Every structure is written in structure tokens, then in C-alpha cells.
Image (tube, grey):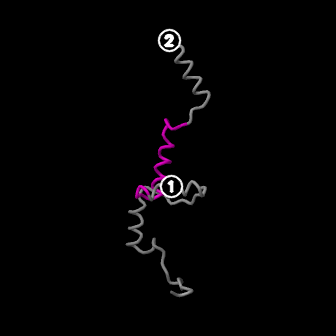
Amino acid sequence: MRKEYDFTGAKRAKDVPHLAKLQAEVAKGKTRITILIDDDVLAVFRARAEREGKGYQTLINAALRVAMLPESAPVTVEALRQVLREELRVR
């Protein structure tokens, strides 16, 4: 393997029609981002992905989807008080 490669004549995938089409199909409905995640959190997702035979990014995406659900919202003291008031009124 060479120490240096000359990429001056290289083209980006978006400029090569069949590669651009392939990238569009693979990334349909998804957006590439850069995110900083704590090392220990990433290690847990990678280990779980290895056990389950899935990609760690897929598992992170699934965890974020669950976190978006209204029933996943943390119970606040105010919400708990409201529920208790409603329950005590019914009886």
C-alpha cells in the first residue's frame, strides 16, 4: 500500500450517477449528522448491537424513538400532584 495517494482527479459520489442513486436509496428518509456521545453510552449500544446482531446506530435510533413517545416523558411532581388530586376527587 502506498504512503500517499493522489485524489486530485477523484469525483464525489454525488457526481457519479449510479453512486448518487445508490446513496439516495440507502439514505431514504434519513439525515446524516455528527453527534458527540459519551464513551460509556456508546460502548453500551455497541455491546448490545453485537449481542443482537444489529447496528448500534439502529439501536440508538430506536431508543430516540421511544424517548419521543408521550408516555416516555418523565413524571414531574406537578403531574403526580394533578393525578392524585383527580383520583382523590373521584372517591
Q: Look at the picture and state if 82 lies above or below 23.
A: above
Residue that appears at 53% across and 18% down: 86
Q: Amino acid at mark 1?
A: Phe
The answer to whether residue 52 is magenta is: yes
Which one is nearer the viewer's eye here, 39 or 32? 39
Q: CA distance from mark 1 to mark 2?
A: 46 Å
Q: Residue furthest bottom?
A: 2
Q: In the rendered structure, which disc, 1 or 2, sits on the residue that comes first in sequence? A: 1
Q: Which mark is residue 67?
A: none
- Where is residue 77 drawn, in percent x and y? 62, 28
| Marks 1,2: beta carbons within 8 A | no
Residue that appears at 58% across and 27% down: 79
- Residue matched to label 1: 45
Q: Find numbered disc 2 in the image and state the secondary structure of the residue it sits on.
A: loop
Single out the mark in the foreground, 1 or 2.
1
Q: Find numbered disc 1 in the image and state the secondary structure of the residue it sits on.
A: helix
The answer to whether residue 8 is magenta is: no
Dividing the picture into quarters, in which one does residue 54 lie?
A: bottom left
Q: Look at the picture and state if 10 lies above or below 51.
A: below
- Residue matched to label 2: 91
Dividing the picture into quarters, in which one does residue 78 lie?
A: top right
- Where is residue 69 drawn, in percent x and y? 48, 40
- Where is residue 48 drawn, in percent x and y? 47, 54
Residue that appears at 48% across and 74% down: 12
In the displayed structure image, the side of residue 7 where residue 24 appears, left or right:
left
Q: Look at the picture and state if 37 lies above or below 16.
A: above
Which region of the structure is painted magenta?
51-73
Which one is nearer the viewer's eye here, 17 or 19? 19
Q: Amino acid at mark 2?
A: Arg
